[in-house]
Image: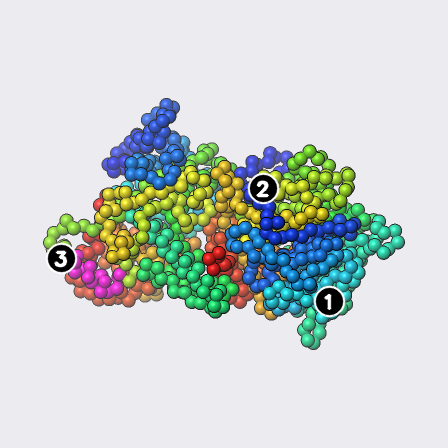
Amino acid sequence: MRTLNCNNQPLLSGFTLSFCLYGAVAFAQASEPNNSINPWDDAALPVHTDAALLEGELDKTTLLKLLDQGEALFNAAFTTQDGVGRPMATQAIIPTKRKRAAREEFSRTAGLDASACSSCHNQPAIGGAGDFVANVFVSEGFQLADFDTTDPQFSNERNTNHLFGAGLVELLAREMSTELAKLRQTGLALARSTGETTTVDLVTKGVNFGKLDIHPDGVVSTKRLEGIDTDLIIKPFSQKGVITSLRQFSVNALNHHHGMQANERFGPRWTGTDDFDEDQVTNEISDADVSALVLWQATLQPPTVETDLPASWTAAAARGSKKFDEIGCNACHQRTLPLDSLVFADPGPMDAAGTLRTGENGATNNTVYDLALLDWASRLEKDAQGRWLVPLFGDLKRHVIADNKVDHLGNELLSQRFVERNVFMTSELWGIGSTAPYGHRGDLTTLVDIISAHGGDARDSRDVYVKLNETEKSDITAFLKTLVIKP
Amino acid sequence: MSVVAESEPMAFHADVPIYAEEASAAGLTIQYDGPWEYFVGGGVATFDCNADRIPDVFIAGGANESALFINRSETGGTLAFEKSTQQSTSIERVTGAYPINIDNDDWIDLVILRVGENQLLKGGPNCTFTQANASFGFDGGSAWSTAFSATFENGQSHPTLAIGNYVDRTAPGSPWGTCEDNQLLRPLNNDNNQANYSEPLTLSPGHCSLSMLFTDWNKSGKEALRITNDRHYHRGGEEQLWNISSGKYPRLFTRADGWQSLVIWGMGIAEGDLNADGFPEYVLTSMGDTKIQTVDVVQASEEQRPVYEDIAYQRGATAHRPYTGEDLKPSTGWHAQFADINNDTLLDLYIAKGNVERMEDFARFDPDNLLLGNHDGRFVERGDKAGIALDRRGRGASVTDFNADGLLDLLVVNRGAPVSLFRNTGFASEHGPRQGGNWLAIELKQNGINRQALGAKLAIKTGNKTQVRHIKLGGGHASGQLGFVHVGLGVAERATVRVQWPDGEWSAAFRLFANHFAVIERGDAHVSYWYPPTAQE
């Protein structure tokens, strides 16, 4: 097996990864070295992250040091000594017991399906996207949890997303969700004070999420919502847009892909046992471990625009950029969304029980870090109001993406977390030049293919695109391929 | 979930609520007291009387006047109540009260149980009530009433009422062996569709009932009337289950039907479906050990035989003596109520406790129980840690979210002492109070008759787990409630909910997000959410 080390260099996994993590551990436990740890031990996580380091507002020095720990965790090839395996638990996000242990612990379909986060998130660098071979098979994990087929009756096959700029994405979602809640609250106050039903237009950062009809008795009808759940919380992660936070995503994925169960959801408080998966390993992932993982992901620099290009490419990209807007791609793939603050708090404000919440452990693990401390932040543009412009090429909204005539992207059979099968969150296009293949299944190899596969709400723009001449299509490709990840 | 009596109990790691007692500060100043007739009773009706969806309370005073308190609590804040000044709700000789919508209008009515003439109060706007015995054709009688339940029988436009009575004080030899009969009041059909209860049926024999509950005991869709009785006064009596199949004269289940004699100091009934199989379990409070009865499912479903087993010991819920203090004498249990108080998806059990008056053979210091459900199916006592172990004689009670924050608060009517009002301030941790599990609160609405959907069942699914709730009115100890149904969701952030409406029709599946108040209206394919007012409004 080959993988990537802390410096993003391919090396043999076991020794090198352990070495990487030990570096972080040495930092985390600097005041009290653990002499019982050998560099050749199989455990990738012999010592948990020191929670004390994650308290309060982090300065740049501490932030950068914690990045090492987070990266080591993201890169760690977990072993059974760490707690890999969930013989009596399924991949479900709600702790769910199996009736009997799976015959094979590792399974390319139902999981366990990876040793490390970076096993899949590695294109073009750790934290990146994945090739088709790194697809994941998403099922609820409640019934038929041990499916051993890729038949779409049992799971939705999904390509691996990249995580670059993920902290900015989560901050945008938080601000938008907060504003939507305020709009709802303002509507409630108006309806109650006037005694009349009030209609609220749910527009935040220029994105329209439909309307609420609010009655004077405080009852809110959500029938006219568009592209968002009825709780008005934008869930910016996953192809489907159903994961609230990097923290929630990390806890889900650790269990699903590695059988590493985080205390904050699978621990005794919620399950009554410290070994819910019955693998004889307790305390597999601490709250601080998740925090370090989140920190590393949240601080990943956003993708950028490649400018070191031949003149012909630069010219074509300029034309393609213009055409991108002319045919309406930017209606959903909005070039930028404005962000008021770069201050990232973990835990965040939108998660529910089962993902650590603000103040849940007192001061412990309440971490705040300003992404502006990172060098890449200075490269973000600002608008006239001083807001950072996040160039994500997305709207953090769900749309119908397939129809009867253009149906390739309607290739799933299972809805996911109340979201219908042909509805997906607008894919953020930043970094798309570095993350082929395309589509939520990763089964489209060219940009022409993926654009042409847009149906549903994107059908009109797609039809215009299809009718463009080859030069115009090539220009759009030239433009999109300038949106790259440059770690 | 399996329970083995001999196995070592599982360690308890779930959340324990931190209750703050704030009755006085909240303005809930009333005391249930009085002579012998008020050794029992002490009920509270919890319901919304002004259409703001915040629960108000009517509290019995015994020899003192009862009172209606309007809930003025801020959302998520400290509790506050305003005492109503209207005369119609200031009544002496009240033992208990239950809220019910008798006439299918926009306002909840009240059934007032008394030592003497019972009263029906018709609800109106803004928590106004008018005496309505005459207009409902209801003869309040002169008995000592202590129990109530209601149901909507098939084809009826108004609820069927059952009233349980205690000792007949006028009979020769009273009080020993002189139990009053109970009553079943079916609404009469009439042309103007007005509720009329002028032809009550007698449920005889009565065995000095202290709680009663209409219940679909065998998942048949037909309700029977379960009555718990006080052996202290009856002679030859026992617990009862009345077959009240619609339109027929009530008939007791007998030995031939499988009913087994159980003789206890029956004080209160709580119904809950511990294993979500549709066959309810029943808590029966008593002096000494509490019972939890579960039915033999095969006999119940295939032969309609009500054969019960007591599982209180297996479940660690006998609660037979005080769990704190030095007193080893047996406890005296009264109101019982199942609810998921710590929002972990497991039903918890609250029991009000307190010596009858000065019964020397029973514990004098007898704190209320907070039995929290554990993952091995047992209950674990945490009343002291939760802060409810006061030296008071509890009677009726209400486990309700009084400040619309998703956390269940607790109101206890005590004999000879002020009511206790415990606000749930969060859950204990080494760092202080913290948030608990996810939750849902669900209101069901129907147009026309039975607007509050009495008799409906809710199936709440999260992952592979299903929880069941029934919309019931009755049981407890002289106390009942209407309003949102609370469900703990643990770490689930969403739930799928189906409703079986009272006529048996199942709804489609509703998709709900956690930590919301949801309003499900029959015929509407969409769920609406309700948001309580904020301090800023």
Q: Are marks 2 and 1 in contact (CB under 8 Å)?
A: no
**Does A425 sit above or below residue A91?**
below
In the figure, residue A316 lies in which quadrant? bottom left
Q: Nearer the viewer, mark 1 or mark 3?
A: 1
Of the image marks 2 and 1, the number of the one nearer the N terminus = 1
Q: Is residue B531 magenta?
A: no
Distance from disc 2 to disc 1, alpha carbons, whole Å, reads 42 Å
Task: Please tell me whether mark 2 sits on a helix, a strand or a loop.
Answer: helix
Q: Which residue is mark 1?
A: B133
User: Looking at the picture, which amino acid does disc 1 mark?
Assistant: Asn
Residue B356 visible somewhere in the drawing: yes
Q: Which residue is mark 2?
A: B386
Residue B475 visible somewhere in the drawing: no
Residue A122 drawn at (x, y percent): 28, 43
In the figure, residue A111 lies in which quadrant? top left
Q: Please tell me whether the stretch drawn in magenta is mainly helix, strand or loop.
A: helix
Q: Which residue is mark 3?
A: A315
Residue span colored magenta: A316-330
Residue A339 drawn at (x, y percent): 30, 53
Q: Residue furthest right?
A: B172
